[in-house]
Image (spheres, rainbow, N blue to C red):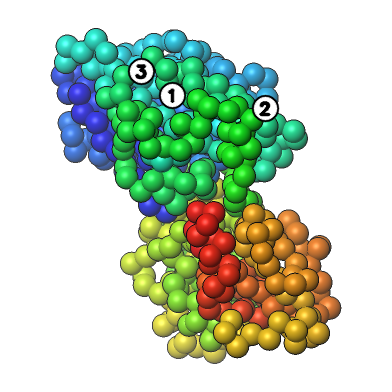
Amino acid sequence: MLLRQIFDPALAQYAYLIGCQKTGEALLIDPERDIDRYIQLAEDNDLKITAVAETHIHADFVSGAREFAHAVPGLQLYLSDEGGRDWSYQWPSRNANLHLLRHGDTFCVGGILIEAVHSPGHTPEHLSFLITDTGGGADEPIALATGDFLFAGDVGRPDLLETAAGAKGVMEPSARQLRESLVERLRDQRDYLQILPGHGAGSACGKSLGAIPTTTLGYERRFNAALKGASDDAAKFVRDILTGQPEPPLYFARMKQVNRDGIEVTGGFRMPPKTTGNQTEDFARGRKGRILDLRPDREVFSRQHLKGAIHAPFGTSFFLAAAGSYVSEEEPILLVLENMGDLEEAVRQLYRIGLDRVAGWTTMEDLQKEPQEWASLRRALFDDFDESAARRAGAILDVRTTVEFEAGHIENALSIPYTRLREKLGDIPRNKPLFIHCGTGRRAGLAASYLQSEGFDATLVDGVCETCERIATDRGITN
């Protein structure tokens, strides 16, 4: 048996290629939408992907299962049939190659036996997959692909159906269901069972995920506080697992919908053309779409950028959080790059969250060769920030998570997490200056650039707020 973990650092997501080296067949679990890289990996290992399985209907990326179903003749598709009416897959045609799995169902890929384990809580339809190398003589599983059920150091968050997808009143029942799954589904498994999680540190699908790529069930039983808590007080587990979860990016709601109901099959992402001067001018004047400025340094961005540009620093965890929270899928996008070499990866990452309409690209170097409509973003350093003067002049906007805000905040500050601004624009005063802060300036920089692009009088309060940082550290929140 061959096992390869494929990591996407932008989304802290893991897919798994599991191949039978005797027959040359392979199963791919939880692929993202740009499937060419998985096909190449299989070919590099003398394998052909003949089956794709999903642990659940994902919220943080567009699944690649539909692209695979159209691209690979004869592909076998394994999806959950455990979600009930609201969380059943709607997009697949009911053909001979579709297999809807319930708890205990099995299938084989070459000499590898896969057993579906219904593990609800994160989502109602969630499956994990027990993997046994029967072709190698094993009669017990070597690994469990857990998706968003069990992570290294944490368990899946049970609130996303409510906080991201808008389902009402499901958080506590989902948390209770998650606890039952953790107790019942793992009870009889051996300590040596390898755990293959769907995400690592940096994912919004949990709050305390470890940075190691794999773990074992025995290790998690000893040191995973959330898993240990599932065996103790049920009410305390529910309370603890629902406390401190950060607000998800706005695009999560659409991901749930398209992964359940379907999204256009494209055959792969498309590289955009380089823009001309007139096309850039159209974007800058707000007539054609959104400008995403991918330069990583917010101070450099603040000094000079195209009018209307939103700061989305490429190569950081904030790139897709900003793009997915501030840009809708209908809006054309112009990318401003620091390095032309970043173009393909940036387009790939946007494609993975359903932002397909990248209409063009340019570089700051090229922009500076022609007249442009430039803008700058005002910055005030936190060490010099006068809260009283800011309140007299306008309004203070705190863009940290609600949990951070409730643990301590500047007097009379308005709280809107940076990932939720687009849906809350009507709650933000337009007739006064806004002073926008977080804990270090990173989230506030994104928020201030977006609000400036929407016509607000925005000032970035940059630098470290020591109290805010202490609160974030206490709650395990990444700034």
Q: Amino acid at mark 1?
A: Ser
| Lower sequence index among marks 3 and 2 | 2
Question: What is the distance, in whole Å, between disc 2 and disc 1 at their CAs?
Answer: 20 Å
Numbered tag placed on residue 128 in the rendering: 1
Q: Is residue 237 above or below residue 247?
A: above
Residue 54 seen in the current view: no
The residue at the point 67 percent across, 34 percent down is 171
Q: Amino acid at mark 2?
A: Pro
Foreground of the two, 181 or 231? 231
| Lower sequence index among marks 2 and 1 | 1
The residue at the point 58 percent across, 38 percent down is 241
Residue 145 seen in the current view: yes
Dot 2 lies on which element?
helix
Residue 307, by quadrant, is bottom right
Of badges 2 and 1, nearer the viewer stands 2
| Lower sequence index among marks 1 and 3 | 1
Q: Which residue is mark 3?
A: 189
Foreground of the two, 262 or 416? 416
Q: Position of residue 330 (x, y in %)?
A: 64, 53
The residue at the point 78 percent across, 67 percent down is 428
Of badges 1 and 3, nearer the viewer stands 3
| Quadrant for the N terminus in the image | top left
Question: What is the distance, in whole Å, between disc 3 and disc 2 at their CAs?
Answer: 25 Å
| Drawn side of residue 456 relative to residue 385, left or right | right
Q: Are marks 2 and 1 in contact (CB under 8 Å)?
A: no
Residue 214, by quadrant, is top left
| Drawn side of residue 332 relative to residue 66, left or right | right
Residue 378, by quadrant, is bottom right
Mark 2 neighbour class, 10 Å CA radius: few under 14, some 14 to 19, many 20 or more = some
Numbered tag placed on residue 173 in the rendering: 2
